[in-house]
Image: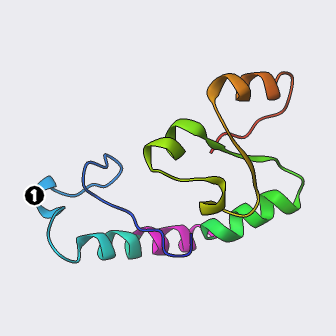
């Protein structure tokens, strides 16, 4: 969690020529640039943002498909994640709720 990296390879959010993406150091540069941009916008780092959400009473769930594809279990995730759920569970659990999808 504290060592998340931005991979520019195949990431349409990065405005960088695709030929540069696989070069050594590009992931580090892209990660640094993203963190700098977020800091300038006064957006907290991922862990701090999740802590703010959890402390405000938000429920945090992880996506079952993403967890399966990345071979992750609940123990691999942020400690505030309540469960790993699928789309059907999410729809049922959030019927009538106010939602913030991130």
Q: Is residue 6 left or right of residue 48?
A: left
Quadrant for the N terminus, please. Answer: bottom right
Residue depicted at 66% across the width and 69% down the height: 47
Residue depicted at 38% across the width and 63% down the height: 6
Q: Is residue 27 above or below residue 7?
A: below
Q: Is residue 56 left or right of residue 37?
A: right
- Choose between 73 and 8: the one closer to the eye: 73
Q: Quadrant of residue 81?
A: bottom right
Provide residue 24's location: percent of width, then percent of height: 17, 75
Q: Which residue is mark 1?
A: 19
Q: Residues within 10 Å of mark 1 (few under 14, many from 20)?
A: few
Provide residue 26's location: percent of width, then percent of height: 23, 71
Q: Is residue 68 left or right of residue 63?
A: left
Q: Is residue 14 left or right of residue 66?
A: left
Quadrant for the C terminus, please. Answer: top right
Extent of the magenta region: 34-44
Disc 1 secondary structure class: helix
- Choose between 41 and 67: the one closer to the eye: 67
Q: Residue furthest left?
A: 19
Residue depicted at 47% across the width and 50% down the height: 71
Answer whether residue 10 is magenta in the image: no
Answer whether residue 37 is magenta in the image: yes
């Amino acid at each position: 969690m504290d060592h998340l990296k931005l991979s520019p390879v195949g990431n349409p959010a990065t405005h960088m020529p695709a030929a540069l993406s696989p070069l050594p150091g590009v992931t580090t540069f892209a990660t640094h640039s993203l963190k700098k941009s977020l800091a300038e916008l006064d957006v907290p780092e991922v862990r701090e943002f999740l802590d703010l959400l959890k402390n405000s009473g938000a429920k945090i769930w992880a996506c079952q498909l993403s967890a399966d594809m990345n071979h992750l279990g609940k123990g691999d995730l942020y400690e505030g994640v309540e469960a790993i759920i699928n789309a059907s569970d999410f729809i049922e659990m959030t019927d009538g709720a106010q939602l913030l999808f991130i």
